[in-house]
Image (cartoon, grey):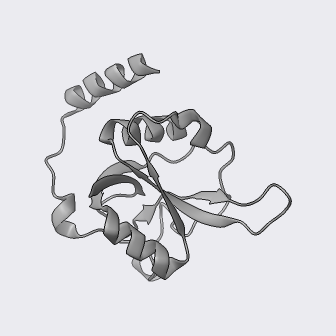
Amino acid sequence: MRVFVLIFNARTENEGIHTIQVGDAYGGKLRNKILMFESEDDATRFSLLLEAQDFPAPTPEPIDAEEIKEFCESAGYEWEIVPENSPLIEKVPEINVEETDWQPDASKEDINQDTFRPNQQQLEEPELSDSELEKIRRKLEGLL
């Protein structure tokens, strides 16, 4: 099954996958969870919601759900499939972590070897022009 995940610095040597931290309300250990969106539109809306809260802007990327599940198992992460048209606002974190496993300006030597790297074949999609992106952005803003 194809899903969409949010990737920071997509298609670079310094990619990072968006996670949310989950834990119990009584001081339990925090765990990382990867959200797998069934809908690209929902992944894009969630990305825009993050950006509106001053989070770094991630890019929705298509990937096979089994590949993400395998990555989560190897990294000790949890995962959740977000059904199409799910109420996303409940899942948007209110705070950002101060230090990430990836850094926007990290050199090759600084990159964590456990970083998730989707299959390159799945990432090769045509890029949209600025005018096309602006049209999509306006449509998405109209949905909010």
Residue occupying the point 20% across, 28% down: 132
Q: Is residue 66 above or below residue 96?
A: below
Residue that sits furthest to the top in the current view: 142
The image shows residue 85 at horizontal and vertical percentages of: 41, 33
Work out which quarter of the rendered image holds the N terminus and state it: bottom left
Residue occupying the point 84% across, 62% down: 27
Q: Is residue 75 above or below residue 138?
A: below
Residue 54 appears in the figure: no
Residue occupying the point 32% across, 53% down: 3
71 or 129: nearer the viewer? 71
Q: Is residue 143 above or below residue 100?
A: above
User: On the image, which quarter does residue 83 sit in?
Assistant: top left
The image shows residue 124 at horizontal and vertical percentages of: 16, 58
Residue 66 appears in the figure: yes
Asked whether, in this view, residue 132 is left or right of residue 99, the answer is: left
137 or 44: nearer the viewer? 44
The image shows residue 110 at horizontal and vertical percentages of: 49, 79
Q: How many marks overall?
A: 0
User: On the image, which quarter does residue 21 sit in?
Assistant: bottom right
Residue occupying the point 33% across, 69% down: 66
